[in-house]
Amino acid sequence: MLASSATTGLVGLDPFTGRVVWRNKVPEGGVTAPVPIAGAILVGTTRYGLFLLSPRNGKVIDGIDLGTGFAQTPAAFAGRAYVMSNAGTLLGLGVEPPLPRPTARN
């Protein structure tokens, strides 16, 4: 589960125990609401760009910065995401889920 707050940041919670698994502080300027996409989390920052985060540990998988930040919450559907930058640029992204982990053969 995810929780987002302007004071505490983005928090990953264990849905069964409620225990905090990971926490990311709020960057200067703030963040958008988190959006699930292709097994990951997409979140914009008003000053530092758009980031794809791992739901397992909250670490950055990838990011993009157009130089103006993103205050609008991204919209995601079927592996595609759309978001408007603070300068009015509409950005469309395709996100593929990770490949399955290889299994050992006997």
Image: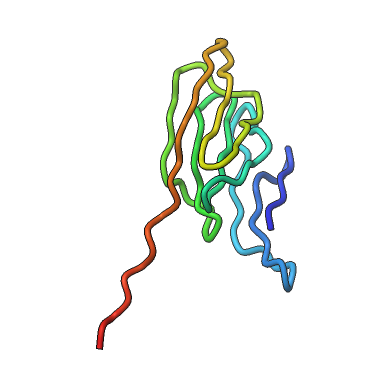
Residue depicted at 56% across the width and 45% down the height: 37
Residue depicted at 64% across the width and 23% down the height: 71
Colour setup of the view: rainbow
Residue depicted at 50% across the width and 22% down the height: 91
Q: Position of residue 9 (x, y in %)?
A: 67, 44
Q: Quadrant of residue 23?
A: bottom right
- Report the residue that reaches farthest toward the top: 87
Quadrant containing the N terminus in the rendered view: bottom right
* Left or right of 45 in this view: 1: right
Q: Position of residue 8 (x, y in %)?
A: 70, 46
Q: Position of residue 92 (x, y in %)?
A: 49, 26
- Report the residue that reaches farthest toward the left: 106
Q: Is residue 51 above or below residue 60?
A: above
- Report the residue that reaches farthest toward the bottom: 106
Q: Quadrant of residue 74?
A: top right
* Left or right of 100 in this view: 73: right
Q: Report how many numbered discs are placed on residues in the image.
A: 0
Residue depicted at 66% across the width and 53% down the height: 11
Quadrant containing the C terminus in the rendered view: bottom left
Q: Is residue 100 above or below residue 24?
A: below
Q: Quadrant of residue 25?
A: top right
